Amino acid sequence: MMVTKIENTYPSILKIKKQIQDEFFGEATGHDWYHIERVYKNALKIHELEGGNPEIIAYAALLHDIADHKFVEDHESETDKRIREILGRENISQSIVDEVLHIAHNISYKGANVANKITSLEGKIVQDADRLDAIGAIGIARAFAYGGNKNRAIYLPTQKPTMHESFDAYKNDEGHTINHFYEKLLLLKDKMNTETGKKIAQERHDFMQNFLDQFYAEWEAN
Ligand code: ADP
Ligand code: NI
């Protein structure tokens, strides 16, 4: 299996994976260990078909949420610090560290009309894997878990979605969770980078669309 082969080739990957598992286990806000593990597995699966450097992909997948902007004061500098620290302990080359930092700094969705700054193939792959975990059945579960954690309504029919023009506007929006589907989740299929990512996203997109149809039907007592 691809994951085992890569882990056997690069022992540092397995060491960092164990460390991240210990650190994130029990985190319930949508950035738990299992989210990271799914991104890691999906990224390596996409890599199998799309190429790229597996070491960069593995580190970026494992470290992409190391300092989430929703939980730390200064996301940029904390991400920088933690990634340099963790990869530095394994003596990973500077060029790989730089590639991983580029991905971690630019992977996040920042609003419907905000440009994506990811340029490397490895970044495109890890971003696709992260986005796949925001859609489909798991994406739906994560969205409502996030909304519940923030005390938000599942749906308020009079409150319409916003196509955000800036990360600040997107980040500070406190709308109901169904809006999040229109502000992010349903837009992701057309923002996928790789052919493999697009294919998987389409299936998950259709599933979300069916979920919404059913949701509105039940809401209207149809
Ligand atoms: P990303 O991985 O693109 O950086 P986030 O860290 O913003 O995503 O979000 C983590 C999870 O929480 C994702 O599944 C995302 O869709 C969900 N989420 C983020 N913001 C909201 C929101 N306002 N309402 C519901 N779910 C959200
Ligand atoms: Ni993530």
Image (tube, rainbow, N blue to C red):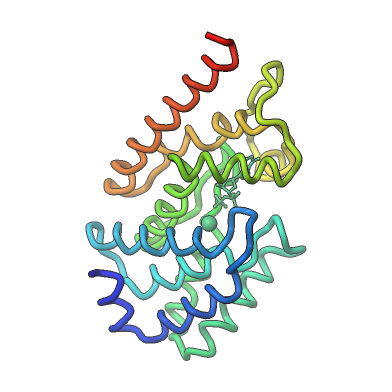
Above or below, 48 against 192 in this view is: below
Residue 16 place in picture, x, y as percent: 48, 80
Q: Left or right: 124 with respect to 148? A: left
Above or below, 67 against 194 in this view is: below
In the image as oriented, which residue stretches furthest toward the top? Answer: 222
Q: Quadrant of the N terminus?
A: bottom left
Nearer the observer, 222 or 162:
222
Nearer the observer, 7 or 148:
148
Nearer the observer, 128 or 29:
29
User: What residue is shown at x 57% (from left), y 41% (from top)?
Assistant: 114
Residue 59 place in picture, x, y as percent: 44, 73
Nearer the observer, 68 or 133:
133
Above or below, 22 against 185 in this view is: below
Residue 86 place in picture, x, y as percent: 55, 82
User: What residue is shown at x 58% (from left), y 69% (from top)?
Assistant: 25
* Total tally of numbered discs in the picture: 0
User: What residue is shown at x 45% (from left), y 86% (from top)?
Assistant: 92
